[in-house]
Image: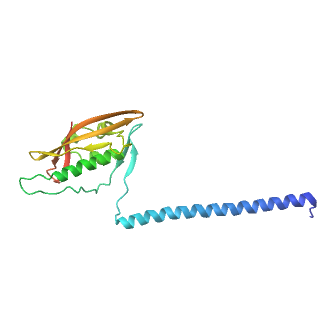
Amino acid sequence: MVLEGSEANELQLRQEHTIMSKEVKVALIGAAATIIAAIIGGIFLLRSVSGSTAVVPTATTSGPATTMITPPTTETQSSQVTPPPGQVDINGAVSTLNTFCQDISAGAMQWAYNLTSQYYRNQHTVDDFSTQFSNVDISNGSGCLTGNATVSGSNVVIPLTIHYRNGFQTSTSHYTATLIQDPQSHTWVIDSIV
């Protein structure tokens, strides 16, 4: 069958359009494969550089507005220092409260909750805790601030100021955090926040 004039031109345009579409598809598939390979390579690189095979924390939703980030169960605390008899390790307690501030500012409520004592956890559920310490205002870089630590017996007492933001409304709450050394792990834990 022989095509003439406009029919031949139309057939040639369709063939060119089809060939160009296939080339574009192949190029897009190649680009997508390259991006996926880079992402997978980056994940393996991060794991090999960190030397850790720990599972990355997972985020779950608890209710309509609270995101809970669950830490790996193997996390250790750096404030496991046993001071000489008669002295209290203030730096360990301050470190724990600073970590608490970082966690609530990042929305890692489960991590922050894990820094509390068994006594505190018996009094406050993780949901109540999350409600109290959510919406920390980090817009000016000072959402959670600790004051000067003082020793009271074998405990450390630290003033705590938290700035909150809920939409356009802001508020500030002042607390006193009392930290104790856990009798089993000897890590500093938050026993009360009032």
Q: Is residue 72 left or right of residue 188?
A: right
Across and down, in percent, residue 34 comes to 56, 64
Indicate the colouring scheme. Answer: rainbow
The part of the image, by quadrant, that contains residue 43 is bottom left
Residue 187 makes an appearance in the image: no
Question: Considering the image in quadrants, where does the N terminus appear?
Answer: bottom right
Across and down, in percent, residue 123 comes to 22, 37
Q: Does residue 160 lie above or below 50 as drawn?
A: above
> How many numbered discs?
0
Residue 12 makes an appearance in the image: yes
* Outermost residue to the top: 169
The part of the image, by quadrant, that contains residue 54 is bottom left
The part of the image, by quadrant, that contains residue 7 is bottom right
> Residue 80 or 70: which is nearer the viewer?
80
Q: Is residue 177 left or right of residue 46?
A: left
Across and down, in percent, residue 93 comes to 19, 50
Looking at the image, which residue is at 11% across and 51% down?
88
Across and down, in percent, residue 130 comes to 32, 39
Question: Considering the image in quadrants, where does the C terminus appear?
Answer: top left
Q: Does residue 127 lie above or below 19 as drawn?
A: above
Looking at the image, which residue is at 81% across and 58% down?
14
Q: Is residue 118 left or right of residue 62?
A: left
Q: Does residue 125 lie above or below 43 as drawn?
A: above
* Outermost residue to the left: 86
Looking at the image, which residue is at 47% across and 65% down?
41
Looking at the image, which residue is at 33% across and 36% down?
131
